[in-house]
Image: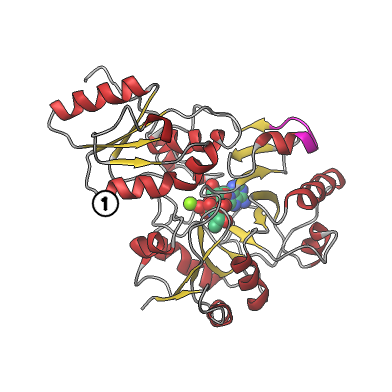
Amino acid sequence: MTRVFDVRTEPAAIAFAAEVIRQGGLVAFPTETVYGLGANALDADAVAKVFSAKQRLLNDPLIVHVGATEDRPDVISELVRQDILGALSAPQHAVAQNLARAFWPGPLTLVLPRGERVPLIVTAGQDTVAVRVPAHPIALDLIRCSGVPIAAPSANRFGHVSPTTAQHVLDDLDGRIDVVLDGGPTPIGIESTVLDLTEIPPVVLRPGGLIRARIEALIGPLRDRSVGAEDSAEHDARPQQSPGLLSKHYAPRAELRVARTTAELIETRRVLMGQGLSVGLLIMDAQQADCAGLAPVFTLGHDLDSVARNVYAGLRALDSAGVDVILVSEVEAQGIGEAIADRLKRASRGRPASTPSD
Ligand code: TXA
Ligand code: MG
């Protein structure tokens, strides 16, 4: 049975959930990005349960969430001392510490050499581990109370859209996990930026909640993971370095298509409906007038921060409405738009709105 607690009215639930973590159970909790599904990162059996609850493949490594840093000026050295991180080169250490001081707690995940205490199941057998300090009071309290680092992927079924509310978690995982801590909707709404610091210059494995420009302002230009080869089914079947990058990931049940303009969005809707398909629209405030009367419509807000916050809820809502196809307008890949555009591309498998067969 899954027990759900609203932490806003039952703050004592955090201590209960921390005990569940210590006993090897699974707890879903809010972070500033999306809800995570947590287990004691030092307990291989507990971590194995995360993979089976999510139906996640064992070749997909988890992020280890560690506690607040305000009283620890050199959190990276501390993680090395605790054997969560392995031996770092001097430049690696300097860059990691620089980033940690600037952006933790926050939506930045750092991939660094794995320490001996982190079981291999957490890292999918790799000698690197992903770590982050989440900027959410419930997540930080849970980590502090349980006294262990918490391994947590997003709390959704594998390949599905990440959860930004406790209800989303239940929709995917009710009955499969022990506890859900409800802390309301997550403030950023899109996953953390994953940065590989074992490469110089560091490589962006996944754009996310911390925008590239802020990182580059601190440590200089970043590299991108080479793109192209990974966007194929054949690639998906091979062991993954960072499987959040699977070509079909973050996907709703309905087919998602990305339109370049509002005119294309509306025209594609007309064509698809002519083929007998039901169509839902995911739009911004500015498109509302043009899309009046074209229900079902889910409105994402007026700026990119609102789009990030609402996009997963929108995909889930239109899925629940039972549409065959979801149409959304392209987002400019700037600032937080880079992460949004990345998720829309993956969820749509790069499919444009109008295809030749239309
Ligand atoms: O915002 C977030 O990052 C959320 C919250 C809960 O913290 N978590 C999250 O976890 O999105 P998940 O498992 O859905 O995505 C983690 C990403 C995956 O793309 C995974 O492949 C990558 O991080 N990753 C984890 N460990 C890695 C490693 N050692 N090397 C490279 N990539 C790694
Ligand atoms: Mg995920």
Query: Which residue has dot 1 on it?
Result: 320
For disc 1, does the CB lie below 8 Å from ligand 2?
Answer: no
Q: Position of residue 42 (x, y in %)?
A: 63, 70
Which quarter of the figure has residue 207? top right
Residue at horizontal 36%, vertical 24%? 262
Which type of secondary structure does the marked residue at label 1 adopt? Answer: helix
Q: Residues within 10 Å of mark 1 (few under 14, many from 20)?
A: few
Residue at horizontal 72%, vertical 43%? 198
Q: Any magenta on residue 150? A: no
Task: Give the residues drawn in magenta, as a range.
Answer: 217-222
Residue extending farthest to the front is 289
Q: Nearer the viewer, residue 22 or 115?
A: 22
Residue 182 visible (yes or no)? yes
Residue 61 visible (yes or no)? no
Q: Is residue 16 left or right of residue 231?
A: right
In the image, residue 311 sits, relative to residue 342, either above or below, namely below
Q: Position of residue 296 (x, y in %)?
A: 25, 41
Residue at horizontal 55%, vertical 53%? 187
Q: Amino acid at mark 1?
A: Ser
Q: Position of residue 155 (x, y in %)?
A: 46, 60
